[in-house]
Image (cartoon, rainbow, N blue to C red):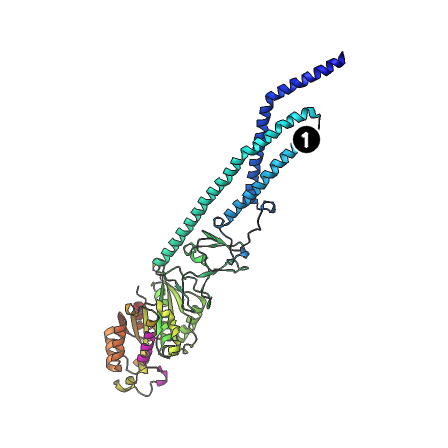
């Protein structure tokens, strides 16, 4: 009887239990499906954190990005490639994680409920039969979410990439507009090769790196800051470089690559070429101009600051020569480096380049390529040595005496120098007819010692009349006034006294040459 009860009641209880389980089975199915959905979403979140922030090896499906793999030694901006790369890695890892998680869940059910259950299969098999559709349901329900999340990621990334490109384009346009306002629309002049540089190259400011970056403007390698391959950050705009944080600029032309002035691009540039024959007095006149500006700055005039060490070193030598009333050595025939200085402050600040070229280059047709810098000039200085004109020795009254050292005269006639140099400058595209010309009659201090000096009052008409009447340079004066929009004549004495004060004629001359 007991056995009959066992064989009857146990199946009845079992069937009753199954019936009760069938009532709650939908809840179990829903909960397990939800658990799988949450597990897959949590896994996606973990992958996103790993790909975007941790960046360890297990979150990579591609070779790691290295800036040294590119020609530009800088890290790419995130929104110019690395962002889409991360999205591709995330999608790949999410697909693998989905397949692995769903597969592991089905295998765990098969093992735990069917092949190796921890208890009787009578209890585990029904539960397992519930879990299979639950896992299938969860795997299906999570697919739209796993598609929507990368799609939202791609949408946000696309908007950010578009915004980054818009900001970069706007910043580049603003930087370009500032260069236009500074009258640098065609670029900055290199003081070594005289070519225009649209945008200089800059070295990494870290002393242990010094990688050179050819274009640091906002774009692929940085919006506000560029990050060098060494990790050092650099400003991407000239307007972000304060006076103390300005980087050393370099010429971008392949045949040059030399350092430019640190102030290049930060202020308008003025180019003043000094034209004249050998020993006409160009170098001394240039030194006197700098000394006059220095004296003016000391007396409350526009501030003067030499732009580089070469200019400062050369000026100190010339300053001492002027103070001792000595004669400078002739300019070397090699291509000269500009003597550069900044003049003024604030909105009136300018970077001025004075070019002193060897006189031989003005008369040798094969050497006039040295005048390339003249293309950027709007004011020219022609140094006229009256002692180089034969009429000076024959027509002046009183006649020059034997005490006037004729070996100090230039060896080339002014008309020959002017004709060839202006022809070369015009052939290079310089707007000569829209430019000004300052004619500096040099060595008037020597002439004054012998009573031969023209009117020292600074009157341009008197100086012009002296050139015509005493030197007979009618054709030269006519050519100058035909070729240039405005011509002004000056009598200059490039000398300084013991207290480093220059002749007043130099101050008037400099004021006109650097007039805005």
Q: Please, is residue 281 above or below residue 159 in the view? A: below
Q: Is residue 43 above or below residue 250?
A: above
Classified by dominant secondary structure, the portion drawn in magenta counts as helix
Residue 48 in the image, given as x and y percentages of width and height: 54, 41
Q: Is 246 part of what is drawn in magenta?
A: no
The quadrant in which the N terminus is found is top right
Q: Nearer the viewer, residue 348 or 353?
A: 353
What residue is rendered at 58% in x and 24% in y? 26
Circle 1 Cα neighbour tier, 10 Å, few/some/many (<14 / 14–19 / ≥20): some
Can I make out residue 356 in this image?
no
Q: Nearer the viewer, residue 349 or 71?
A: 71
Percent of width and height locating residue 175: 39, 55
Q: Residue furthest bottom?
A: 402
- Which residue is under mark 1? 112
The residue nearer to you, when weighing 457 against 224, is 224
Residue 47 appears left or right of 373: right
Q: How many marks?
A: 1
Q: Position of residue 282 (x, y in %)?
A: 36, 75
Image quadrant where one finds the C terminus: bottom left
Is 74 positioned to the left or the right of 18 in the image? Answer: left
């Amino acid at each position: 009887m007991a056995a009959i009860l066992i064989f009857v009641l146990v199946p009845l209880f079992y069937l009753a239990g199954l019936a009760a389980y069938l009532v709650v089975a939908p809840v179990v199915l829903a909960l397990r499906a939800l658990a799988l959905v949450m597990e897959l979403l949590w896994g996606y979140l973990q992958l996103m954190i790993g790909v975007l922030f941790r960046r360890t090896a297990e979150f990579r499906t591609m070779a790691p990005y290295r800036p040294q793999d590119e020609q530009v030694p800088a890290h790419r901006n995130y929104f110019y490639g690395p962002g889409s790369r991360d999205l591709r890695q995330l999608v790949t890892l999410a697909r693998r994680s989905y397949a692995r998680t769903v597969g592991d869940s089905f295998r765990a059910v098969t093992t735990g409920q069917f092949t190796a259950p921890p208890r009787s299969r009578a209890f585990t098999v029904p539960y397992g039969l519930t879990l299979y559709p639950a896992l299938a349901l969860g795997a299906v329900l999570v697919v739209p979410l796993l598609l929507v999340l990368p799609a939202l990621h791609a949408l946000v990334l696309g908007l950010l990439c578009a915004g980054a490109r818009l900001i970069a384009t706007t910043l580049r346009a603003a930087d370009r507009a500032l260069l236009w306002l500074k009258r640098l629309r065609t670029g900055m002049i290199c003081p070594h090769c005289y070519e225009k540089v649209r945008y200089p190259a800059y070295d990494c400011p870290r002393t242990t790196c010094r990688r050179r970056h050819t274009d640091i403007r906002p774009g692929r390698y940085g919006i506000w800051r560029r990050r060098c391959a060494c990790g050092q950050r650099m400003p991407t705009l000239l307007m972000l470089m304060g006076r103390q944080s300005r980087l050393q600029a370099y010429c971008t032309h392949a045949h040059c690559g030399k350092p430019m002035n640190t102030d290049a691009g930060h202020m308008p540039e003025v180019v003043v070429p000094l034209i004249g024959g050998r020993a006409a007095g160009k170098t001394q006149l240039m030194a006197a101009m700098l000394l006059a500006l220095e004296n003016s700055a000391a007396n409350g005039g526009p501030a003067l600051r030499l732009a580089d060490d070469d200019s400062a070193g050369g000026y100190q030598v010339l300053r001492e020569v002027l103070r001792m009333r000595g004669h400078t050595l002739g300019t070397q025939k090699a291509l000269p480096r500009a003597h550069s200085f900044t003049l003024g402050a604030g909105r009136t600040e300018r970077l001025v380049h004075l070019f002193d070229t060897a006189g031989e280059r003005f008369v040798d047709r094969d050497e006039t390529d040295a005048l390339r810098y003249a293309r950027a000039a709007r004011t020219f200085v022609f140094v006229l040595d009256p002692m180089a004109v034969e009429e000076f020795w024959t027509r002046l009254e009183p006649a020059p005496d034997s005490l006037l050292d004729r070996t100090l005269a230039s060896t080339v006639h002014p008309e020959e120098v002017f004709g060839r140099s202006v022809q070369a400058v015009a052939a290079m595209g310089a707007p000569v007819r829209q430019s000004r010309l300052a004619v500096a009659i040099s060595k008037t201090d020597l002439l004054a010692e012998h009573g031969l000096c023209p009117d020292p009052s600074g009157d341009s008409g008197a100086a012009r009349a002296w050139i015509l009447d005493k030197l007979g340079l009618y054709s030269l004066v006519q050519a100058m006034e035909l070729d240039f929009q405005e011509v002004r004549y000056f009598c200059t004495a490039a000398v300084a006294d013991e207290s480093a004060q220059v002749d007043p004629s130099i101050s008037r001359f400099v004021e006109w040459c650097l007039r805005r």
